[in-house]
Image: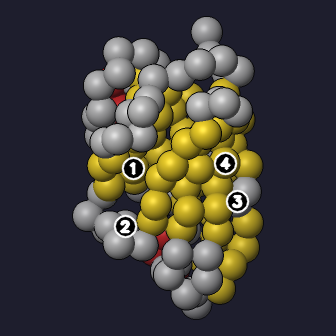
């Protein structure tokens, strides 16, 4: 069992930046970020393998978001730049136990409680 705790969400103006953190209770393999906007289904945002050598991003955030990790601290980060109102959502981190990078929720085994990101126009 891996416990995940997200932090770093908040209210920011359009064009601003936020950095989300996800602290894990133990070692993890592939880590992902997903988000769920009001009235919408949860969607993939980004993922990173254990070594950090492979990352994957949703088309909607490519070039604006960066995912990274510090394995010494069992923490994954999501740096979000040039934020838009449509980025408003609850952001969740997730952990996958096989080490396969994936954009599908079904492939992730553990989930955090989420952190709210609100981007004002």
Q: Is there CB contact under 8 Å for labels 3 and 2? A: no
Q: Nearer the viewer, residue 35 or 16?
A: 16
Separation of disc 2 and disc 4 at Cα?
Answer: 17 Å
Secondary element under disc 1, as helix, strand or loop, is strand
The C terminus: image quadrant: bottom right
Separation of disc 3 and disc 2 at Cα?
Answer: 17 Å
Residue at left 31%, top 42%?
A: 54
* Mark 1 / mark 2, whichever is N-terminal: 1
Q: Tell me the crowding category of disc 4: few under 14, some 14 to 19, or many 20 or more residues within 10 angstroms, Cα based.
A: many
Q: Is there CB contact under 8 Å for labels 1 and 2? A: yes
Q: Relative to residue 65, is residue 2 depicted above or below?
A: above
Residue beneath disc 2: 61
Secondary element under disc 4, as helix, strand or loop, is strand
Q: Relative to residue 5, is residue 118 depicted above or below?
A: below
Label of residue 9 in the image: 3
- Residue 46: in sight, yes or no? yes
Residue beneath disc 4: 21
Q: Position of residue 12 (x, y in %)?
A: 68, 78
Secondary element under disc 3, as helix, strand or loop, is loop
Separation of disc 3 and disc 4 at Cα?
Answer: 9 Å
């Amino acid at each position: 069992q891996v416990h995940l705790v997200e932090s770093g969400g908040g209210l920011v103006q359009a064009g601003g930046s936020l950095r989300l953190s996800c602290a894990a209770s133990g070692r993890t393999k592939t880590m992902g970020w997903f988000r769920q906007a009001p009235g919408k289904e949860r969607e993939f945002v980004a993922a990173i393998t254990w070594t950090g050598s492979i990352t994957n991003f949703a088309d909607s955030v490519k070039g604006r978001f960066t995912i990274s990790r510090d394995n010494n601290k069992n923490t994954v980060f999501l740096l979000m730049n040039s934020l838009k109102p449509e980025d408003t959502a609850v952001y969740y981190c997730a952990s996958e136990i096989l080490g396969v990078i994936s954009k599908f929720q079904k492939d992730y085994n553990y989930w955090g409680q989420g952190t709210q990101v609100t981007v004002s126009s």
